[in-house]
Image (tube, rainbow, N blue to C red):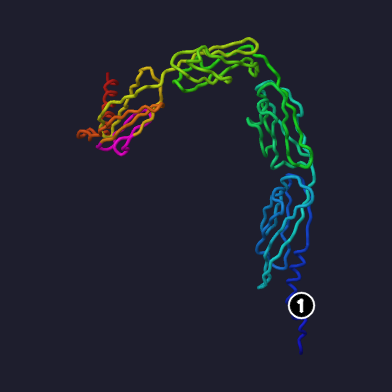
Amino acid sequence: MKRNPYLRTNLVLLPAVIMLAFAGQARAQSGYVGESIYLPAPSVPGILDAAGWYSDNTGAVSVSGNISGATVRIDSYFSGQVTVTCQYAYHSGSYKNNGRAYYYISCKPSSLRLNENNVTLDPGQSVKLTYTNSSGFDLPFVAWTTSDEEIANINSDDHAYGVKTVTVKAVRPGECIITCNGNTGTEAPTCTITVRNVPATGISLTPEKLTLQEGKSGRFECRMTPEGASSETSWSSSDEGVATVSASGRVTATGEGTATITVSTDNGLSAKAMVEVSPAPDQVTLPSSLQVTSGYSMVIRPELVPSNAMTGFEWETDNDKVASVDDTGRVKGKTPGTAVITVKTSNGKSATCKVTVKEPSEGMDYRNVSVRISVLEELIGESSSDN
């Protein structure tokens, strides 16, 4: 019997024809911003081995999937269509092949509404704003912004992202606009925040006294009553050769002495506080040398010139294996030898001390001494209870 050569050719080409036919088929779905759409895996003439999913507009949709299918989340409104492609591989018996399937996603617009559109607050008061989406879906990348964070801020900032509810806090008198932009295809809703002017009936400064080193800065906090009062304030110093003060109450020490800082409101109230400025040290000294027993510690106390100078200290050792030092000047002997301990003031003055670490006397290492002290304390306790 003679075989038909065309029959053989058709049998060989049949799988490829099936694959090409499927690669050309398309599926179309639509959804709202925030909605997740399920895409089924391609149907193949065999077993699906692998599937990779991607879109031609990653800014509009997010795609994740495998051989079971894919989930497409619409992140932002878009017109027209986004194409999601599934590139796959499959086998049927010993036959292996691959192909592509295309899915087309379109986006439907939805509208947002806020629970409040006009709010009046006193300084310090807060209001919670939340949106509802006509589609019912929460938004993945909604953006909340304020037109003036010095009048009202959002979650203690000038913006918030990806949350359904925010806290808007009034800061100072004025008016600003809170906008909720969800990129849903319609106009973003807004809320007008009006912050009232509340005159102060009382004013005070904390702390009552501020002690600073010459050249350093500190701050007085102005408190007004009632809570949320918003009177304008002005600041002054009785002696700018000693300390200056900014419009926010920040004080800079300019010279040794004392000065009075005064804050006044625009409705006639005032409060005062004292600033005492100590000079920076001209010199710092340490004992030239000291001894410490291995395992024991001692505190080195620097002396300043002039004696009323004020400064912070930094400590270091040149041999931590012999002796260590902490930020209070406490030196601990580790092993016999010598180490140089250096102290530096905040204005760059320094001094050194040579520390010699010696071996403890026989039976007097710190472990034995600790045990002896414990035993002695027990004996004293027992004697006291017997009496």
Quarter of the image with the C terminus in it: top left
Q: Is residue 41 left or right of residue 240?
A: right
- Give residue 309's position: percent from left, percent from top: 39, 19
Q: Secondary structure at mark 1?
A: helix
Residue that protrudes farthest toward the top in the picture: 268
- Give residue 63's position: percent from left, percent from top: 69, 52
- Give residue 350's position: percent from left, percent from top: 35, 28
The reply to whether the magenta stretch includes residue 331 is yes
Residue bearing mark 1 = 10
As drawn, 226 above or below 287: above
Q: Is residue 185 left or right of residue 368?
A: right
Residue that protrudes farthest toward the front in the picture: 241
The magenta stretch spans which residues?
317-337
> Residue 324 sits in which quadrant?
top left
Q: Name which residue lies at 38% across and 22% down.
A: 281
Q: Amino acid at mark 1?
A: Asn
> Residue 160 sits in which quadrant?
top right
